[in-house]
Image (cartoon, helix red, strand yellow):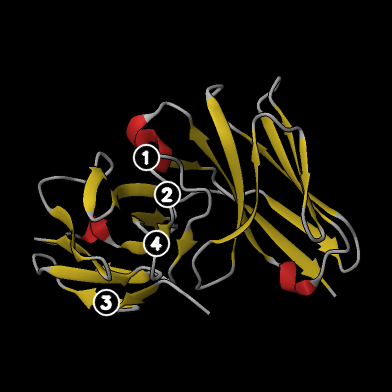
Amino acid sequence: DARVTQTPRHKVTEMGQEVTMRCQPILGHNTVFWYRQTMMQGLELLAYFRNRAPLDDSGMPKDRFSAEMPDATLATLKIQPSEPRDSAVYFCASGLSRGAGRVYEQYFGPGTRLTVT
Amino acid sequence: GESVGLHLPTLSVQEGDNSIINCAYSNSASDYFIWYKQESGKGPQFIIDIRSNMDKRQGQRVTVLLNKTVKHLSLQIAATQPGDSAVYFCAENVNAGGTSYGKLTFGQGTILTVHP
């Protein structure tokens, strides 16, 4: 049963600390998405990659957030420095895009619940 | 103190009833729509999708209806079960080419509670 995995599942940190969240997409999927979910804003797309290349990160605060795919089996989302307003659940999702086309199903991981105090 | 956040619509039904969850989407250029189910503590789970060249699509116990005229989407769940209790989100995607294919815009969600 192929699944997207995310680590850590929970993270509590102090303001100003660096936070790194990791995602392992489903093997064979070529598109990876990062989302953030809060009570205020709902579910928002932060960034996404196709074939490890960043395609769109317009939803991500550029000054403190960065997203990378060091290899096809690992995506990372980093916040440095973290702030209390970054507290949220961060989801990774993966999917398969044929050519430059649409991903018709995105498979979500269980999320990382981040609390910044 | 009081927390401020989204006040999600709620739907309460009895087990065995049919449920209808509604969604108004925002962009008339959207041509692909998806329904997701999110259980507490889990990520959203794909339920069913529909493309704009269709008005209706059926899955197992679920049906999605699309009315492009009024930009409305609905999810019908037949014979609702306690395991269907979750938050349901609609999402839309705009066919604008290029990087747009990855961009889903999610609705706020509806809380479905199924009573045994």
Q: Quadrant of residue B83?
A: bottom right
Q: Which class describes the residues within 10 Å of circle 3: few (<14), some (14-19), or many (20+)?
A: some
Tell which subunit mark 1 falls on.
A
Contact (Cβ within 8 Å) of mark 2 with mark 1: yes
Tell which subunit mark 3 falls on.
A
Q: Nearer the viewer, residue A106 or A11?
A: A106
Q: Position of residue B114 (x, y in %)?
A: 78, 67
Q: Residue B46, can we see it? A: yes
- Give SS at disc 4: loop
What is the C-alpha distance between the residues marked 2 and 1?
7 Å
- Give SS at disc 3: strand
Residue pictured at 12% horizontal, 53% vertical: A64
Q: Quadrant of residue B30?
A: top right
- Which of labels 2 and 3 is toward the front? 2
What is the C-alpha distance between the residues marked 4 and 2?
8 Å
Label for residue B75?
Answer: none
Mark before the other along the chain sequence, 1 or 4: 4
What is the C-alpha distance between the residues marked 1 and 4?
14 Å
Contact (Cβ within 8 Å) of mark 1 with mark 4: no
Residue pictured at 52% horizontal, 54% vertical: A105
Q: What residue did someone put label 1 on?
A: A100
- Which of labels 3 and 1 is toward the front? 1
Q: Same subunit under labels 2 and 1?
A: yes
Query: What amino acid is at disc 3?
Result: Lys
Q: Position of residue A73 (x, y in %)?
A: 28, 71
What is the C-alpha distance between the residues marked 2 and 3?
31 Å
Q: Which class describes the residues within 10 Å of circle 4: few (<14), some (14-19), or many (20+)?
A: some
